[in-house]
Amino acid sequence: MAQNSLLVLEAANIFVGDDPTASNHLILKNVKFPTVEKAYVDFTAGGAMVGVEVDTHFNKFEVTFSLAGYTPQVLSQVGIWARASQQFSLYGMLRDRLTGATQRVEAYVFGQLSKAAPDNFDRGTLNAIEYAIKGVTHYELLIDKNQIYYWDMGTNEMFVGGVDIEADQNAALGVSGSSGAQREITSPVTGQVGR
């Protein structure tokens, strides 16, 4: 039987690019991890009394976050195509509200920093800049080193909870490279290998 838990995200950090010294934990106002959502189309067969929803794909991934003040290192990454600029590492601390224990949540995203939208300047308030990561081609989410999601556009692999949900399609289409097993990942920031 699984232990009851209430995991709450208490703190977060984001690294933009592959610079391990570019921590944003002191100025990060908010961050939104990608939404994982299936897309459906309605279908009603010619002789059917009831329609059904048919799943077709997952919607595109996007990450948004806001940093207080102006951060030249982040601002200078908007629209850059260099592979080193397309790496984003998100870290967070989850606390189990029932036991007090902590766990790490980590996400690795490859995409393009596509938006830097400064707040209006109002004297007496701390303005921030809202950023967006779009054109995502790779996404991984791990909780306490357990892989929850793994998606890579180049290999057409998608694991959800350790299950390769593209295995049958890749086999039918003759797509090679699908491993059928969880991948070892290396954080582009810390250089640590996780599972």
Image (cartoon, helix red, strand yellow):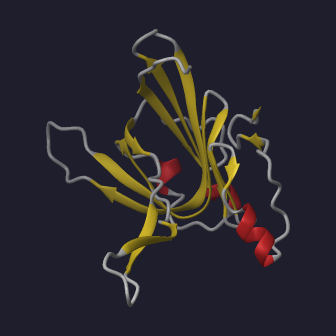
Q: Residue at x 44, y 68 (%)?
A: 39
Q: As rendered, which of 161 and 118 lies closer to the eye? A: 161
Q: As rendered, which of 145 and 187 lies closer to the eye? A: 145
Q: Residue 97 placed where, x, y %?
A: 39, 15
In this rendering, position of residue 154 left or right of residue 95: right
Q: Residue at x 76, y 44 (%)?
A: 182
In this rendering, position of residue 161 left or right of residue 52: right
Relative to residue 6, is residue 33 depicted above or below? below
Q: Residue 42 placed where, x, y %?
A: 37, 77
Q: As rendered, which of 58 and 27 lies closer to the eye? A: 58
Residue at the bottom extreme of this rendering = 46
Relative to residue 26, is residue 79 depicted above or below? below
Q: Residue 36 placed where, x, y %?
A: 48, 54
- Which quadrant does the C terminus fall into? top right
The picture quadrant where one finds residue 100 is top left
In this rendering, position of residue 76 left or right of residue 119: right
Relative to residue 170, is residue 133 depicted above or below? above
- Which quadrant does the N terminus fall into? top right
The picture quadrant where one finds residue 111 is bottom right
- Total residue callouts: 0
Does residue 20 show up?
yes
Q: As rendered, which of 164 and 31 lies closer to the eye? A: 164
In this rendering, position of residue 140 left or right of residue 176: left
Q: Residue 151 placed where, x, y %?
A: 65, 56
Q: Residue at x 43, y 58 (%)?
A: 132
Does residue 25 show up?
no
